[in-house]
Image (cartoon, rainbow, N blue to C red):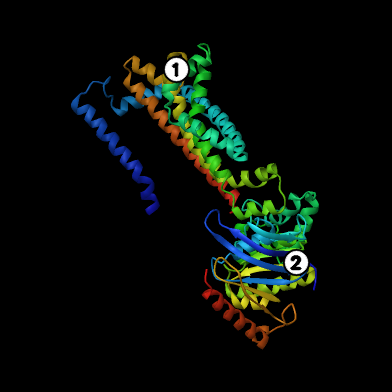
Amino acid sequence: MTPATVALEDVEVDYRGRGRALGPLSLRIGDGEIVALVGPSGCGKSTALRLLAGLEPATRGVVQRAPGRGETSVVFQAPTLAPWMSAAANVALPLELSGTPKPEARARALEALERVGLGGAGASRPAQLSGGMAMRASLARALVTQPRLLMLDEPFAALDEITRRTLADDVLGLWSQTRPAIVFVTHNVEEAAYLAERIVVLTRGPGRIAGEVRVEAPLPRPAGFRTWPVFTEAAEAISALLAKGAEAAP
Amino acid sequence: MNRLADALAPLGLMLLLLGAWEAACRLTGVPAYFLPPPSQVAVAAATGLPVLVPAAWNTLSVALVALVLAAAGALLLAILVGLSPLLERAVRPLASALQVTPVVAVAPLILIWAGIDHPERAVIALAVLVAFFPIFSGAVTGLRSADPDLERLFDLYGAGRLQRVLRLRLPAAVPFLMEGLKVGAGLAIIGAVVAEFAAGSGGVRGLAWQILDAGNKLQTDRMIAALVVLAVMGVAVHAGLERLERAGLRWWRGR
């Protein structure tokens, strides 16, 4: 077992005075592991993600986080780029906020943009980028700090199918370079089976673990992986767990 | 063709109204001190131009100084309030109370405080008072308008309070600030005019004073000429700020 990057033990989160949002939940993310959190809307997936990122405290239970400040990155559903800054300035922002001198931050930002295939777009403003390009810039901003833990909160939800698939392969390609632990939230079963080594399925809210599915196949995925039996079986197993989790009593 | 019609329509209506006004004055023989015909107003405006232009400048410069002071004060207070929720709760009721109190009612007090020898200070102070609130509430709203996920990123990377204000909240507030400035500028002119009236003949010799002076002398044509200059000035300032706002927003959005 690889050492844990982040672990939740019997964690619960309450809405402010309106009952439980999530848990009890125990979850362990190993170093360099890619884990998908799948569940129906309102099951607390995004809450779990913020908990793992250290952006939200647990009401009860223990959250153990190994990454220090600046070693966790989050990519949100929307690209969340500041419209008043160029793409390069947006990507350099995490570095500048944590005290990296501006010229160095800008140089590393341009490198990160290069890595996500946006080499020439550093001077562009977010409004000049397409949806897919903006998401890539957002990914570059998350990777520029070379995080140990990368969180993706339904990052491809707003994109068309072809862009989604290209970005999924790109994420895996980037992962293989520095091997951060990746936790991503989705409600797309196939995306989960394609991207993750381990898929954790949550019940409807307050989310608990309905079950786990492992995908034993090489990463990044080989061409045509979507036709492999291991992929289709995993997708079916996830769907079955989702159906089971939807029946669970609240 | 359509755009030409759009441009000509307001002009046509204006000419029509002026024509009706001129005809009505001539046909009814109403005395000029009661309602002078537009031709007489035009003559008064033309001959009075050497007086009206400096007067307009006086009013405008008071409004602009007031706008700058109000903007600086409002932004500073908005930032402080944004840093401390407690301060915001403390300031809110006081701000609303001041906002709903008519300037005319406060004017005599401000005149006393500014000193009888410095009525121009009182006029500026009153215009500041009127222009302050739209800029302040725009700034407060704007400073809170940053994308919550961007705020979370700033949490994640351990940004300090000052970094958060300078790099996130202030730039995010820019569209709100520009809107507030536009509204504030219009109000600053109104404030300057009202304050000139309240300050009377000892105050700034701006357009309001011209209107008062002409009124005292029953020179109705001069009164209306000053009003026209005031309206033209207001429209020009508004149009200028509108263009500035559009250019600013284009820069902010990057297209």
Would you name the residue on which mark 2 appears? A115
What element does badge 2 sit on? helix
| Image quarter (top left, top right, bottom left or bottom right) of the N terminus of chain A | bottom right
Q: Which residue is mark 1?
A: B108
Q: Using the image, determine if residue B95 lies above or below residue A232.
A: above
> Could one spot residue A76 in this view of the protein?
no
Look at label 2 and name its amino acid. Answer: Arg
Q: Residues within 10 Å of mark 2 (few under 14, many from 20)?
A: some
Which chain is home to disc 1? B
Residue visible at 47% across and 29% down?
B98
Residue A10 in the image, given as x and y percentages of width and height? 66, 64
**CA separation in Å, label 1 and label 2:** 67 Å
Query: Which residue occupies the foreground of this view, A38 or B99?
Result: A38
Rendered location of residue A139, percent (x, y)? 69, 63
Q: Label 2 lies in what chain?
A: A
Judged by depth in the image, the label closer to the viewer, 1 or 2, is: 1
Q: In the image, is residue B90 above or below residue A132?
A: above
Q: Quadrant of residue A143?
A: bottom right
